[in-house]
Image (cartoon, grey):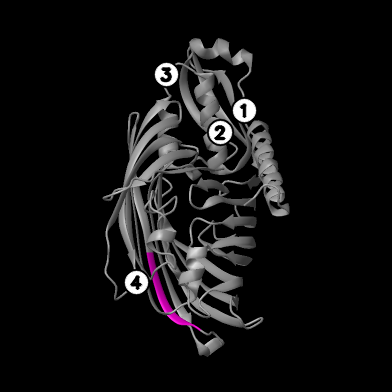
Amino acid sequence: MRRNTLFGRMVAAVFLAGFLFGLFSARAFSWNPSDDTNVNSRYTVESVEITGANESRLSRGLREELRRYVGQRFSPEAFARLSGRVRDELKARLVSPKLTKGSSPDSVRVALDVMGRRVNVSTDQSRLAWHTQQGWTGSLMLTVEQRDRQRLTLSGFSDGDTATERRTGASAGYSHTLFHGRIRSGFTVSTAEAKYDARTLSAAGTNELYRNVDSFQPTVTFVPWRGDDREELAVEVGVRLQRFALLSPEANRHVASHALVNTLRYRRVRGDLETGRLTLTGLAGLSHSIGGNYAFDRQEVRGGVEYHRGPSRLTVDFTGGALHGNAPFLERFAAGNTQLLRGWNKFEIAPLGANRLIASNIEYGHSVKGKLEASAFVDTGSIWNRGTTQIARTSAGCGLRTRDGFYFYVAFPLRDGRIEPMLMTGATF
């Protein structure tokens, strides 16, 4: 993506606006302790309570952390941080610590006062990345959530990383939650244009690639189980309706792909860290029964665990997938990017993608200063088509990353012969 193009200037302007909004929001909703609380640091905390909201709505980990401060010296910085966490979990407009005298002269009672529910506006799922072989990838997602019940998302993207082709377009979605978040119904609409690397174009067959795609996907999500510390199991069912314009000599050659979508998700959070995740997704293509041109089945599994001990972190992720039948090009798997088989070139190992994938990532990080980590990783896996030889590939790399989502890595494939290191950097915000 060149900066002197109209689209490049638009993306740069959008990212700048998102950055400024995030900076303003962080300051606007952060509580800074006033100077008069510093004199209270000599007092002992007699009790901690939540006012203005039900304490049971907090995660077990946060409730336990609040209780651990009983008997300790009052710290304005510590309770400012705890107030921010309470605000985020309850999606409150403001959480402010209030101090009252305790039962003894040298003690205080702390009440975290929850004030109002807010319309939460965030760009948490936005992403910016750069790869030596793939160039820039960017997506800006704006989420507006009201009272934990209604959610509106707007997104613009140019993704040359996760799939074989580069997809540039926009999407919008709406969802509504019922029964305290146990049921969420909604829909997503999107449109995207595809661009291809020269190696993909030369390897593709007639009517294999597409020019653009429009999609509509209504879904219903059920949450049958929740744990004490923000553990959650969710089941999503829906229908994906897509219409393609094929990249072929024939003008405006349109085809359709319709599929049933079933997704099982598990997520575990300890404190403010996600320590466990698992996603199982299944697609069943509906052919001529509702006007589709493709009949296929696609299964994908993604999961991982994260361990923290002192300044050290160990993350293990895995991905696997299989595609059967006659499927549109965008359903194929890709590897050799900033997420899977880092250090390999996806256009070298699978210029058309593939219908089989298995990959794992193991990464060790050690805190250098604050949230900054020095890390090293080893990726291994294989991407291939059914009926062809499966080749195992391994790559390694090192670099810096933060727990906020920024990373800078140098990675290279482990193979005989030449060594071609690849640089990749990016951030989520």
Q: Nearer the N terminus, badge 2 or badge 1? A: 1
Residue located beneath label 3 in the image:
72
Mark identifier at residue 385: 4
Residue located beneath label 1 in the image:
31
Element type at mark 4: loop
Q: Nearer the N terminus, badge 3 or badge 1? A: 1
Q: Are marks 4 and 1 in contact (CB under 8 Å)?
A: no
For label 2, the crowd category at 10 Å Cα-Cα, with few meaning under 14, some 14 to 19 and many 20 or more, is: some
Cα distance between the residues tagged 2 and 1: 7 Å
Q: Are marks 2 and 3 in contact (CB under 8 Å)?
A: no
**Residue 393 appears at what percent x and percent y?**
29, 55
Cα distance between the residues tagged 2 and 3: 20 Å
Write the start and end of the magenta stretch as one range: 294-300
Q: Are marks 2 and 1 in contact (CB under 8 Å)?
A: yes
Of circles 3 and 1, the one toward us is 1
Q: Nearer the N terminus, badge 4 or badge 3? A: 3
**Residue that appears at 64% across and 56% down:** 155
